[in-house]
Amino acid sequence: APAAGAPAAATSEAPSAGADDKVKAIDGFRSAKFGMSEADVRAAMIKDFNAKPDAIKAQDNASELTHSILMSVPELLPNGGTAELSYVFGYKSKSLIQVGAVWSKGTDTAMTPEKLFSNANILRAHFMGEGFKPDSIAVNMPVAGGIVMFRGSDAKDRSVILLLQGTFENKENNQRVLTPSSLLLFYVADAKSPDIFKLPPGQF
């Protein structure tokens, strides 16, 4: 594709000199870039996945007042089964603030815990080699209902989060073993203060 078609914003972000050059930039997912409008993201999804426009479904989040578009993608990860991609648009900006992918029995009836572990390990190994800000990286961190397999941020605090969700059981020697039920991958433009609806302080 000719570079001339790239959005102006992408070209104005020349790499800043210095240490940031080695840090991977997280600017979205494939052709869909943070800050894009819904129409542009739909076009990017159609281009990236050879998708039919009617394969893209819309959904609103009643509490955050964000809007999402969703699509099932087989083999998003080679041999990884079918995933559901979600692209989330901000409450105020109406532009792309997050891209997520979910692998689970809900997205693919043939999904197994083994496949989820395999997908998680492949993605974690990939992200470990990507060159995120070293002080931002967390690996294998237990959280409520699962394990953060990987979390990392770029120089602008845009983040990748890989979360394996499931149920823990205590096995012998008090080893807590996770049986995964879903794998979630998020690309987030601003994890610290996302563009979602919040009640202004002092109102209640």
Image (cartoon, rainbow, N blue to C red):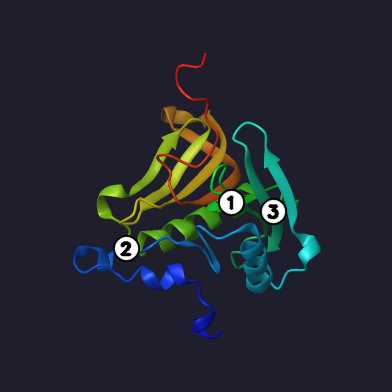
Q: CA distance from mark 1 to mark 3?
A: 20 Å
What element does badge 1 sit on? helix
Q: Residues within 10 Å of mark 2 (few under 14, many from 20)?
A: some
Q: CA distance from mark 1 to mark 2?
A: 24 Å
For residue 166, what is the image quadrant?
A: top right
Determine whether 5 is above or below 132 in the image.
below
Pointer 2 or 3: first along the chain: 3
Residue at image coords 34%, 56%: 154
Asked which secondary structure carries label 3, the reply is strand
Which residue occupies the foreground of this view, 93 or 65? 93
Q: Residue at x 62, y 62 (%)?
A: 41
> Is residue 80 toward the left or the right of residue 131 in the image?
right
Mark 2–mark 3 distance (CA, rounded to whole Å): 29 Å
Measured along the vertical axis of the image, is residue 144 above or below residue 77? Answer: above
Residue displayed at 30% across by 48% down: 136
- The residue indicated by pointer 1 is 116
Kind of residue at badge 1: Leu
Q: Please state the horizontal and vertical placement of residue 8, each as a whole percent of the image.
A: 46, 72
Q: Residues within 10 Å of mark 1 (few under 14, many from 20)?
A: many
Question: Which numbered dot is residue 131?
Answer: 2
Left or right: residue 136 versus residue 104 is left
**Of helix, strand and loop, which one carries label 2?**
loop
Between disc 1 and disc 3, whose residue precedes? Answer: 3
Residue marked by disc 3: 70
* Image spot of residue 172 (x, y percent): 46, 30
Judged left or right of residue 196, residue 192 is left
Q: Position of residue 2 (x, y in %)?
A: 53, 86
Dot in front, 2 or 3: 3
Closer to the camera: disc 1 or disc 3? 3
